Amino acid sequence: MHAKARSTAEISFKVGDHVLFRDPSLFWAGKPSHTFVCRVEHAWLSGGYDLVCLNTRRKVSQADPDYMRLLPPADAMRDIDTAPLHADGAADDMTAAALAWLTQHHATANQRPELPAQHD
Protein backbone atom coordinates (compact mmCIF):
# COMPACT_ATOMS: atom_id res chain seq x y z
CA MET A 1 0.00 0.00 0.00
CA HIS A 2 1.29 3.48 -0.84
CA ALA A 3 2.09 5.84 2.04
CA LYS A 4 -0.60 8.31 0.95
CA ALA A 5 -3.30 5.62 0.75
CA ARG A 6 -2.24 4.21 4.12
CA SER A 7 -2.44 7.62 5.83
CA THR A 8 -5.86 8.28 4.30
CA ALA A 9 -7.24 4.98 5.62
CA GLU A 10 -5.94 5.80 9.11
CA ILE A 11 -7.98 9.02 9.30
CA SER A 12 -10.96 8.69 11.60
CA PHE A 13 -14.02 10.85 11.37
CA LYS A 14 -16.30 11.98 14.18
CA VAL A 15 -20.07 12.11 14.32
CA GLY A 16 -21.08 15.54 13.04
CA ASP A 17 -18.09 15.96 10.72
CA HIS A 18 -18.80 17.18 7.22
CA VAL A 19 -17.15 15.05 4.56
CA LEU A 20 -16.96 14.75 0.82
CA PHE A 21 -18.01 11.22 -0.13
CA ARG A 22 -17.44 9.56 -3.48
CA ASP A 23 -19.71 6.58 -4.06
CA PRO A 24 -17.29 4.07 -5.60
CA SER A 25 -20.03 2.02 -7.30
CA LEU A 26 -21.36 5.06 -9.15
CA PHE A 27 -17.88 6.46 -9.84
CA TRP A 28 -16.42 3.28 -11.34
CA ALA A 29 -19.59 2.70 -13.37
CA GLY A 30 -19.17 6.18 -14.88
CA LYS A 31 -22.51 7.37 -13.55
CA PRO A 32 -23.20 10.99 -12.62
CA SER A 33 -23.69 12.42 -9.13
CA HIS A 34 -21.12 10.10 -7.58
CA THR A 35 -19.57 12.70 -5.25
CA PHE A 36 -21.47 14.68 -2.64
CA VAL A 37 -21.19 16.42 0.73
CA CYS A 38 -22.37 14.43 3.75
CA ARG A 39 -22.53 14.62 7.51
CA VAL A 40 -21.23 11.67 9.55
CA GLU A 41 -24.15 10.21 11.52
CA HIS A 42 -22.51 7.11 13.03
CA ALA A 43 -19.03 5.62 13.31
CA TRP A 44 -18.84 1.82 13.38
CA LEU A 45 -16.13 -0.10 15.23
CA SER A 46 -15.50 -1.93 11.95
CA GLY A 47 -14.25 1.35 10.49
CA GLY A 48 -17.27 2.18 8.34
CA TYR A 49 -19.44 5.26 8.69
CA ASP A 50 -23.12 6.01 8.24
CA LEU A 51 -23.56 9.25 6.32
CA VAL A 52 -26.41 11.54 5.33
CA CYS A 53 -26.13 13.54 2.11
CA LEU A 54 -26.78 17.19 2.93
CA ASN A 55 -28.44 17.92 -0.39
CA THR A 56 -30.81 14.96 -0.81
CA ARG A 57 -30.95 13.47 2.74
CA ARG A 58 -29.91 10.15 1.11
CA LYS A 59 -28.43 7.78 3.69
CA VAL A 60 -25.19 5.92 3.02
CA SER A 61 -24.56 2.92 5.28
CA GLN A 62 -21.11 1.63 6.16
CA ALA A 63 -19.28 4.11 3.94
CA ASP A 64 -15.63 3.21 3.40
CA PRO A 65 -13.37 5.95 4.82
CA ASP A 66 -11.04 5.55 1.83
CA TYR A 67 -13.75 7.29 -0.20
CA MET A 68 -14.27 10.11 2.30
CA ARG A 69 -12.42 13.40 2.76
CA LEU A 70 -12.89 15.74 5.71
CA LEU A 71 -14.27 19.18 4.90
CA PRO A 72 -12.61 21.32 7.59
CA PRO A 73 -14.52 24.25 9.09
CA ALA A 74 -11.58 26.52 8.25
CA ASP A 75 -12.23 25.93 4.55
CA ALA A 76 -15.92 26.80 4.91
CA MET A 77 -15.10 29.97 6.85
CA ARG A 78 -12.11 31.12 4.75
CA ASP A 79 -14.10 33.85 2.97
CA ILE A 80 -15.03 35.36 6.32
CA ASP A 81 -11.58 34.95 7.83
CA THR A 82 -9.81 36.57 4.88
CA ALA A 83 -12.41 39.17 3.88
CA PRO A 84 -10.86 42.60 3.31
CA LEU A 85 -13.56 44.38 5.28
CA HIS A 86 -11.77 47.73 5.11
CA ALA A 87 -11.96 47.94 1.29
CA ASP A 88 -14.83 49.57 -0.62
CA GLY A 89 -17.16 46.93 -2.03
CA ALA A 90 -15.55 44.16 0.03
CA ALA A 91 -18.95 42.73 0.90
CA ASP A 92 -19.82 42.30 -2.79
CA ASP A 93 -17.73 39.12 -3.01
CA MET A 94 -19.06 37.56 0.21
CA THR A 95 -21.82 35.01 0.38
CA ALA A 96 -25.14 35.89 2.00
CA ALA A 97 -24.38 33.52 4.88
CA ALA A 98 -21.06 35.23 5.54
CA LEU A 99 -22.73 38.63 5.58
CA ALA A 100 -25.45 37.41 7.93
CA TRP A 101 -22.87 35.94 10.29
CA LEU A 102 -20.80 39.12 10.30
CA THR A 103 -23.88 41.29 10.85
CA GLN A 104 -25.01 39.16 13.78
CA HIS A 105 -21.51 38.98 15.25
CA HIS A 106 -21.04 42.73 14.89
CA ALA A 107 -24.40 43.45 16.55
CA THR A 108 -23.69 41.26 19.57
CA ALA A 109 -20.02 42.25 19.84
CA ASN A 110 -20.88 45.94 20.14
CA GLN A 111 -23.52 45.57 22.83
CA ARG A 112 -22.63 46.25 26.41
CA PRO A 113 -22.81 43.08 28.46
CA GLU A 114 -25.68 43.06 30.88
CA LEU A 115 -24.89 42.65 34.53
CA PRO A 116 -26.73 39.91 36.39
CA ALA A 117 -29.63 41.08 38.57
CA GLN A 118 -28.66 41.82 42.12
CA HIS A 119 -30.25 39.80 44.84
CA ASP A 120 -30.79 41.21 48.35
Image: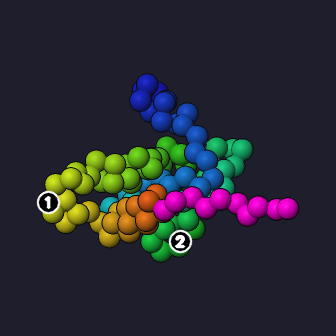
- Quadrant into which the C terminus falls: bottom right
Q: What stretch is highlighted in magenta?
A: 111-120
Q: In this view, does 79 lie to the left or right of 56?
A: left
Asked whether, in this view, residue 112 is left or right of residue 92, the answer is right
Residue 35 visible in image: yes
Q: Disc 1 residue type? A: Asp
Helix, strand or loop for disc 1: loop
Task: Please provide percent x and percent y for residue 109.
Answer: 46, 57
The alpha-carbon separation of the residues under discs 2 and 1 comes to 42 Å
Q: Residue at (53%, 45%) from the top-left corner?
A: 65
10 Å crowding of disc 2: few (<14), some (14-19), many (20+): few
Q: Is residue 71 above or below residue 93?
A: above
Q: In this view, does 41 lie to the left or right of 77?
A: right
Queried whether the magenta region covers residue 119, the answer comes back as yes
Q: Where is residue 106 in the image (x, y as percent from the top left)?
A: 40, 61
Q: Residues within 10 Å of mark 1 (few under 14, many from 20)?
A: few
Which one is nearer the viewer's eye here, 31 or 106? 106
Q: Which residue lies at the image location 44% right of the left edge and 59% below the top edge?
A: 110
Q: Residue 40 carries which label?
A: none
Quick one: which residue is furthest to the front in this view? Answer: 120
Task: Give yes or no for residue 107 being in the magenta stretch.
Answer: no
Quickly name the residue at label 1. Answer: 88
**Disc 2 designates what residue?**
58
Q: Answer with mark 2 or mark 1, whichever residue precedes in sequence.
A: 2
Amino acid beneath label 2: Arg
Left or right, 11 with respect to 43, comes to left
Name the residue located 44 percent from the left edge and 47 percent from the top edge: 72
Residue 34 visible within the image: no
Of the pair 46 and 36, the residue shown nearer to us: 36
Most common secondary structure along the magenta stretch: loop
What secondary structure is found at the residue carrying circle 2? Answer: loop
